[in-house]
Amino acid sequence: MALTKKSLKNWNPRSGDLPTSFAMLSIWNTKEVYKLQVKGVSGLMYAACLGSRVIDALMPWLKFPSVPNIFKNFGFYFLYGLHMEGKDGSILMKSLCAFAHNMARNDKDCRVLVAEVGQMDPVREAIPHWTKFSWDQDIWCIKNLRAGEENRNSQEYWIKSQISSSVIFVDPRDN
């Protein structure tokens, strides 16, 4: 959770009242559970990604954005429970994302940060990202795995999920 210095002095966490401006997120280090690997890219794409890392290593002052080695097994940090409020919420969220980035940078097995937010969620604008690696129209298919549930005979029931809110809260414990 991130607070402004001004509200940090005056806020009593035991009161149950939140400050007017704040941001929060949770970080799940998934590398103990999941390992990912990207396969099937062209040789040209592989060389371009490798070249970006070489340029970044040889000339770090250029701040050239390099693509991490995602072609070998890697872990990732999953950012969830992202929420912000108040006029300073956006700045505070960017600060939390920078903290998560630095944390991941110091972890040699973590190569990617992943955050899932709704298309209309205001927190979306505060999350730093590369547009080339972000997709607006991702679709999540949800299938009920419990036997005996209603509508289980319908072939399409599991691909339909109703949007309940503009804000998505993902709980990684719900595997």
Image: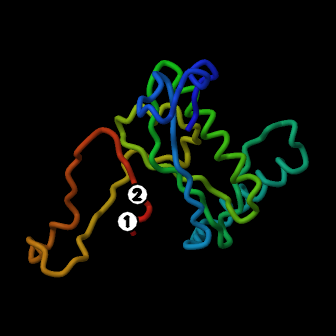
**Residue 22 placement, left or right of 102:** left
Label count reads 2
Along the line of sight, the residue nearer the viewer: 35 or 16: 16
**Residue 16 placement, left or right of 112:** left
Which of the colour schemes (rainbow, by chain, secondary structure, one colour) is used? Answer: rainbow
Classed neighbour count for the residue bearing mark 2: other residues with Cα under 10 Å, few (<14), some (14–19), many (≥20): few
Q: Give, as a three-letter code, the residue at label 2.
A: Asp
Image quarter of residue 73 = bottom right
Along the line of sight, the residue nearer the viewer: 174 or 151: 174
Q: Is residue 51 above or below residue 71?
A: above
Classed neighbour count for the residue bearing mark 1: other residues with Cα under 10 Å, few (<14), some (14–19), many (≥20): few
Q: Quadrant of the N terminus?
A: top right
Residue at the image position 57 percent from the left and 65 percent from the top: 30
Tell me the SS state at disc 2. Answer: loop
Location of residue 90 in the rendering, given as x and y in whole percent from the top left corner: 52, 27
**Residue 38 placement, left or right of 19:** right
Q: Give, as a three-letter code, the residue at label 1.
A: Asp
Q: Which mark is residue 171?
A: 2
Q: Which mark is residue 174?
A: 1
Image quarter of residue 53 = bottom right
Q: Are marks 2 and 1 in contact (CB under 8 Å)?
A: yes
Location of residue 51 in the rendering, given as x and y in whole percent from the top left corner: 78, 55
Residue at the image position 39 percent from the left and 69 percent from the top: 175
Location of residue 94 in the rendering, given as x and y in whole percent from the top left corner: 59, 33
